[in-house]
Image (cartoon, rainbow, N blue to C red):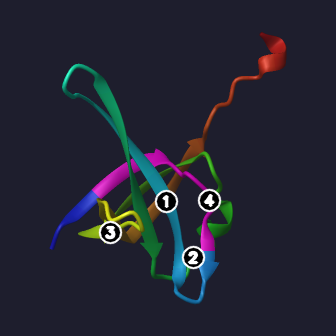
């Protein structure tokens, strides 16, 4: 089993439907390609498979700490390209804070 920990900002409000509860955390990386530096973002799907009231507080921009089992797969897009798919079955989630957005009116 592959277990991991992650701290990040939630990319969209947490959702709850018949297939479960969850949210997404983006992980960005930068690497030097041929001639240029490339930015890549990998979205980690976090599933919460236990009863918790914390889901109502997980909104876009909320910083969270999660730990759980990680599963890696390949997702084939409509255009035929394959991209990695990372899913975490969350066993623990903690709220750490909210993203600080700059107030542009006070610039």
Label 3, label 4: how far apart the Cα atoms are: 26 Å
Dot 1: what SS? strand
Secondary structure type for disc 4 = loop
* Disc number lying in front (1 or 4): 1
Q: Position of residue 52 (x, y in %)?
A: 57, 76
- N-terminal label among 1 and 2: 1
Along the polypeptide, which appears first: circle 1 or circle 4? 1
| Residue beneath the point at 61% across and 45% down | 61
Query: Residue beneath label 1, please?
Result: 24
User: Which residue sits at x=33%, y=65%?
Assistant: 80
CB under 8 Å between callouts 1 and 2? no
In-front residue for pair 39/10: 39
Q: Is residue 14 magenta?
A: yes
- Between 100 and 42, the one lying in front of the other is 42
- Quarter of the image for the C terminus: give it: top right
Q: Which residue is mark 3?
A: 75
């Amino acid at each position: 089993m592959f277990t991991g920990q992650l701290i990040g900002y939630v990319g969209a409000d947490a959702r709850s439907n018949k297939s479960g509860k969850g949210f997404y955390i983006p992980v960005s990386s930068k690497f030097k390609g041929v001639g240029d530096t490339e930015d890549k973002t990998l979205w980690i799907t976090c599933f919460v498979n236990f009863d918790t009231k914390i889901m109502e507080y997980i909104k876009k921009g909320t910083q969270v700490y999660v730990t759980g089992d990680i599963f890696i797969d390949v997702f084939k897009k409509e255009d035929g390209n394959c991209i990695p798919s990372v899913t975490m079955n969350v066993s623990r989630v903690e709220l750490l804070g909210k993203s600080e957005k700059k107030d542009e009116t006070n610039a």
